[in-house]
Image: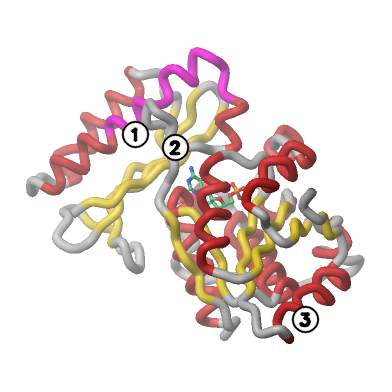
Amino acid sequence: MTEILRDKAALRARVTAWKRAGETVGVVPTMGALHQGHLSLVQAATAGADRVIVTIFVNPKQFNTPSDLENYPRTEHADADKLVPFGVDAVYVPGPDEIYPDGFATSVHVEGLTGILCGAFRPGHFDGVTTVVSKLFLQTGADRAWFGEKDYQQLQVVRRMARDLDIPIEVIGCPTVREPDGLALSSRNLLLPADARARAPAMGREMRGMAEALTAGRSMAELTAHASAALAQAGFDKVEYLELRAADGLALLDRADRPARLLAAAWIGGVRLIDNIAVG
Ligand code: AMP
């Protein structure tokens, strides 16, 4: 059974002993409802650090609507079981007071990178992410952290935050894990009604088609209207964004004239899905 730690004092004692023994410490921050995407990060972490901590905390500060927070799947026991085969050293499941004690008054905000893409549609979301992730970095004292490219903007924002605040941690990105039909794994996929689930892979399909066309020299101006119409046709209610951005720094692009990323967010069956792929 993997040990579950619920308070930061116990966590700190454990990490101090490991570091004293000269061991490197890795952390994989999650909100639980673990799937193969999360587990791919855990696998990478076990290969890249002597000791691995998986954190599970459904962070209220990064949800925009109370119903999204309420509906978020919580499967702590199943999560702990899924981690057993990886031999992780600790699962840190902090109670709310370990993260946001009475009178908590600090927020970590990254400028620029957070005003676009998801940040434009989910006000305060990235402040919630950077506030909790900076706390988890400091509480775990980890040397390395693994994040998924599935949340590409989050990965960029967290890297910027760690650099800007001189938190001595290396942030490592891992490729998106997908279902056989191409849908990116997400805890929110559990909330998709069956018909929406069947139609959801259209997003990745359209994006792959666009990525090929962009690589062949076409522009976003030429491609976007057709792709949006195809998504509406497939049953997506609303496309929040479908944008080409520089892979590093996320500047808006029309053509893939440098390493780029195509990123999208869209709603289907009452669930908001995001995806992104490399272009060029
Ligand atoms: P979450 O529990 O959704 O906050 O995600 C925790 C971590 O798992 C984040 O670094 C995510 O980017 C990563 N993650 C989520 N879905 C996937 C996926 N399909 N493939 C790879 N990593 C993922």
Please give the residue where the numbered disc 3 appears in the rendered image.
16
Dots 2 and 1: beta carbons under 8 Å? yes
Residue 17: x and y in percent read: 78, 80
Q: Is residue 5 magenta?
A: no
- Helix, strand or loop at mark 3: helix
Residue labelled 3 has its Cβ within 8 Å of some atom of ligand 1? no
**Tag nearer the camera, 3 or 2:** 3
Mark 2 neighbour class, 10 Å CA radius: few under 14, some 14 to 19, many 20 or more: many
**Tag nearer the camera, 3 or 1:** 3
Residue labelled 2 has its Cβ within 8 Å of some atom of ligand 1? yes
Quadrant of the rendering where the C terminus is positioned: bottom left
Which residue corresponds to the image point at 80% horizontal and 73% vertical from the top-left?
A: 14
Disc on the earlier residue, 3 or 2 = 3
Which label is found at residue 184?
A: 2
Q: Is residue 199 magenta?
A: yes
Q: CA distance from mark 3 to mark 2?
A: 37 Å
In this rendering, position of residue 54 left or right of residue 7: left
Nearest the eye: 162 or 245: 162
Dots 3 and 1: beta carbons under 8 Å? no
Residue labelled 1 has its Cβ within 8 Å of some atom of ligand 1? no
Identified by mark 3, the residue type is: Thr
Residue 181: x and y in percent read: 38, 26
| Quarter-of-image position of residue 188 | top right
Please give the residue where the numbered disc 1 appears in the rendered image.
204
Which residue corresponds to the image point at 77% horizontal and 41% vertical from the top-left?
A: 76
Disc on the earlier residue, 3 or 1 = 3
- Helix, strand or loop at mark 2: loop
Identified by mark 1, the residue type is: Gly
